[in-house]
């Protein structure tokens, strides 16, 4: 642009950027017409007219809906109104963004014209438009899909957390109301909810820490053993050790569920009773033993990934490190602690963190093994339910939608805080786009 | 001598660890395989080494008029295949934009992707059910595919973007100087170099729906539309002890091919994950 100014040098003092800006605020595209960018101006005008004609009624309904959640029971369906309202808000946000870009564009161009810049030919400006909008062509399909399959549903769930939607108060028979933080308050004050919440929450934390740490420790231990140069048939052992990762998880979990069955499971029938006598262990009806079994199963399922990951890293550590350490007379433990461990952990830290967050929300193991059971007195979640499986039960078994949404919002916030703290330092944010 | 003895003892230790692990790993799998070959349907009368070898459960899956197994298999292949292809296209476009272009909302978009991953997918289920109902895609495979493709964007866009960032920009710049357009650079330069990570994305997105039980259980209602995970779960969910052998047979037919593929590809999976994952 700077070059253009020098070449033409034809300063157009009468052209007024403020006027262009005001015109564009009055109606998108007018400022562009004033700047004599006719094609762009007309496209903007048509877009705004189309927007007003097609969407204004819908947006009116949506905004009214999300504020009131309906006024006449049966006729007004609060849930649909809520969804319309959220869609309206998303559309408005995009319209505001577009409008802002339109005003910004009119002002910028008017300034350039005032400084003597001449509009390029139609062909050039179309090409320039294509260059500038190509990135939006790339991202728009993904963005739209993301908005409707992820963003909108999440916003909906967040909204539900602040309503009173449950089995007894459900549309269309009843209208929903906004209740503010009532659900969160009951979670902490109503004894049944409070007891359940704290016992489920503490088990979730124990589960996450213990199961994941076992996974990582076993994976690391086996990777170090398998990496020993003296071991023969390495490939054979590696393949077996990785097998649990290759078998579909839901198949293994369901197999374990049958094996641990109190009455006819092979663990009681073929191992515990013959070895120790008695009538076997109540794997599925005593919460303590169910928890032990779950941690065992998750370790079984999860260590091979860590094992494979660490094996790769171990092979990449240069031998020089160990040779230098041997010259200094380091013991094996010192070599492990000061060379192996830092290398392995440094290279895989983000993936290890993801292991913890995955287990925090590991619905499959908990639910497929024993559906979160066995039932426990004095709380409305099973003895091995973690937060996420409790949410599932509240949603799909007892239809307590608001409470489920409130709890999942708490889960989301906890994990976000943890992850943002961890990921802040990663490089992807720093690498700026170049074009 | 002393040293040699120590060496031998250590190796015995190492091999006994491996032996113990092998038993722990193989026992459940062989047990299930044995179950699937038993004649009866009850777990009481079945054992890991069947008294009467029989393929009767496998036969039932394919020939019995009450069995939807072939349908489930087909549905799973449709869902997984479409998800893999569409996800690769969608994700590579988005990741390319985030890796190479400057645009309004780039940084906000990256943060949004990260935050969206934190919220449990379960949270979105109620709304997805309502939305699909609104547009009439409930109980259809296309509805399911749509959700999978949309839901994978945040995670995989990061993964692929991380990988694309490692491809030197000089390559696309010199192509641009030679007159290549945006699309040409993307198709001729970036895509071929990004093949390894795109293969990982394709495999992930093929496997996820194959093993997923939660989302199909909410969206699909009629037996003939079930995917394989959902169908198998329902086998044993209703009458656990009565159908386990049948479940085992059905599970073997999906677990064996999938395991073989995984064992062959695990190296690429790991390298793809570390290259994208550790660089963030």
Image (cartoon, grey):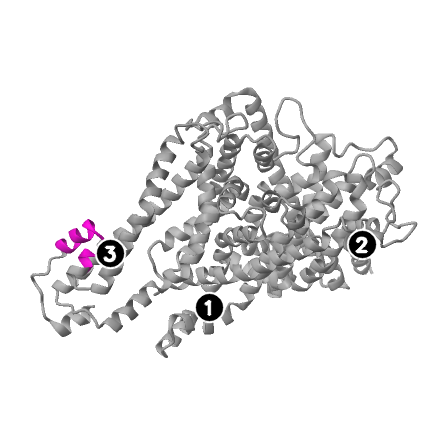
User: Callout 1: few (<14), some (14-19), or many (20+) C-alpha neighbours within 10 Å?
Assistant: some
Q: Residue at x 44, y 27 (%)?
A: A73
| Quarter assignment of residue A312 | bottom right
Query: Which label belongs to residue A45?
Result: 3
Which is more foreground, mark 1 or mark 3?
3
Residue carrying label 1: B167
Q: What type of secondary structure mainly makes up the magenta span?
A: helix
Residue A113: percent from left, percent from top: 14, 64
State the residue lying farthest toward the right: B51
Q: Are marks 3 and 2 in contact (CB under 8 Å)?
A: no
Q: Which chain carries label 3?
A: A
- Give yes or no for residue A169 being in the magenta stretch: no
Q: How far apart are marks 1 and 2 (CA)?
A: 49 Å
Q: Quadrant of residue A175?
A: top left
Provide the secondary structure element on which disc 2 rests: helix
Magenta span of residues: A18-32
Write down the chain letter for disc 1.
B
Q: Name the residue under label 2.
A: B58
Chain letter for the residue marked with disc 2 in the picture: B
């Amino acid at each position: 642009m700077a070059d253009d100014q020098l070449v033409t040098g034809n300063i157009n003092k009468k052209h007024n950027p403020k006027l262009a800006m005001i015109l564009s605020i009055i109606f998108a595209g007018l400022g562009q017409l004033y700047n004599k960018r006719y094609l762009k101006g007309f496209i903007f005008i048509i877009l705004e007219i189309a927007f007003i004609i097609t969407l204004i009624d819908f947006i009116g309904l949506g905004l009214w809906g999300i504020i009131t959640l309906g006024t006449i029971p049966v006729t007004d369906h609060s849930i649909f109104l809520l969804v319309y309202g959220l869609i309206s808000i998303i559309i408005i946000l995009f319209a505001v963004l577009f409008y802002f870009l339109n005003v910004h564009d009119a002002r910028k161009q008017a300034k350039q014209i005032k400084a003597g810049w001449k509009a390029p030919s139609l062909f050039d400006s179309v090409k320039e438009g294509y260059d500038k909008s190509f990135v939006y062509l790339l991202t728009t399909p993904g963005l739209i899909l993301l908005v409707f399959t992820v963003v909108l549903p999440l916003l909906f769930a967040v909204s539900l957390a602040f309503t009173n939607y449950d089995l007894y108060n459900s549309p269309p028979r009843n209208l929903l109301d906004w209740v503010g933080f009532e659900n969160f308050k009951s979670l902490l004050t109503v004894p049944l909810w409070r007891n359940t919440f704290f016992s489920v929450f503490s088990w979730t934390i124990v589960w996450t820490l213990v199961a994941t740490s076992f996974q990582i420790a076993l994976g690391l231990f086996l990777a170090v053993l398998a990496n020993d140069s003296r071991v023969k048939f390495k490939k054979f052992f590696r393949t077996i050790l990785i097998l649990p990762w290759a078998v579909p998880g839901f198949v293994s979990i369901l197999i374990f569920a049958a094996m641990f069955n109190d009455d006819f499971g092979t663990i009681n029938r073929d191992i515990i009773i013959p070895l120790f006598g008695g009538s076997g262990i109540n794997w599925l009806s005593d919460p303590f033993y169910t928890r032990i079994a779950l941690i065992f199963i998750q370790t079984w399922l999860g260590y091979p990934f860590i094992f494979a990951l660490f094996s790769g890293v171990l092979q990449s550590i240069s031998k020089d490190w160990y040779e230098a350490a041997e010259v200094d007379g380091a013991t094996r433990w010192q070599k492990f602690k000061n060379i192996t461990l830092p290398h392995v952990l440094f290279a895989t830290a983000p993936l290890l963190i993801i292991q913890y967050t995955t287990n925090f929300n590991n619905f499959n193991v908990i639910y497929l093994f024993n559906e979160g059971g066995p039932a426990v007195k004095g709380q409305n979640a099973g003895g091995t339910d973690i937060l996420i499986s409790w949410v599932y039960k509240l949603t799909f078994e007892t239809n307590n939608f608001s409470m489920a949404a409130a709890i999942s919002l708490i889960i989301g916030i906890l994990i976000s805080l943890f992850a943002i703290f961890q990921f802040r330092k990663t490089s992807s944010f720093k690498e700026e786009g170049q074009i | 001598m002393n040293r040699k003895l120590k060496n031998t003892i250590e190796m015995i230790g190492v091999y006994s660890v491996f032996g113990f692990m092998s038993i722990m790993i193989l026992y459940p799998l062989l047990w299930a395989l044995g179950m699937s070959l038993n004649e009866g349907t009850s777990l009481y009368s079945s054992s890991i080494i069947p008294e009467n070898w029989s393929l009767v459960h496998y036969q039932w899956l394919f020939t019995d008029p009450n069995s939807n197994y072939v349908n489930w298999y087909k549905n799973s292949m449709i869902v997984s295949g479409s998800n893999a292809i569409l996800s690769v296209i969608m994700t590579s476009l988005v990741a390319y934009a985030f890796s190479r272009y400057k645009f309004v909302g780039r940084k906000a978009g990256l943060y949004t992707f990260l935050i969206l991953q934190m919220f449990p997918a379960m949270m979105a289920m109620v709304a997805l059910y309502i939305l699909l109902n609104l547009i009439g895609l409930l109980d259809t495979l296309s509805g399911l595919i749509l959700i999978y493709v949309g839901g994978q964007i945040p995670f995989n866009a990061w993964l692929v973007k991380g990988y694309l960032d490692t491809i030197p920009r000089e390559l696309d710049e010199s192509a641009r100087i030679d007159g290549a357009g945006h699309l040409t650079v993307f198709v001729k330069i970036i895509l071929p170099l990004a093949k390894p990570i795109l293969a990982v994305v394709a495999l992930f997105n093929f496997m996820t729906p194959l093993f997923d039980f939660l989302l199909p259980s909410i969206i699909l209602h009629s037996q003939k539309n079930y995917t394989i995970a959902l169908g198998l779960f329902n086998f044993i969910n209703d009458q656990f002890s009565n159908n386990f052998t049948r479940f085992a047979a059905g599970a073997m037919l999906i677990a064996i091919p999938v395991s073989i593929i995984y064992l062959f590809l695990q190296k690429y999976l790991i390298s793809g994950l570390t290259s994208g994952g550790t660089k963030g």
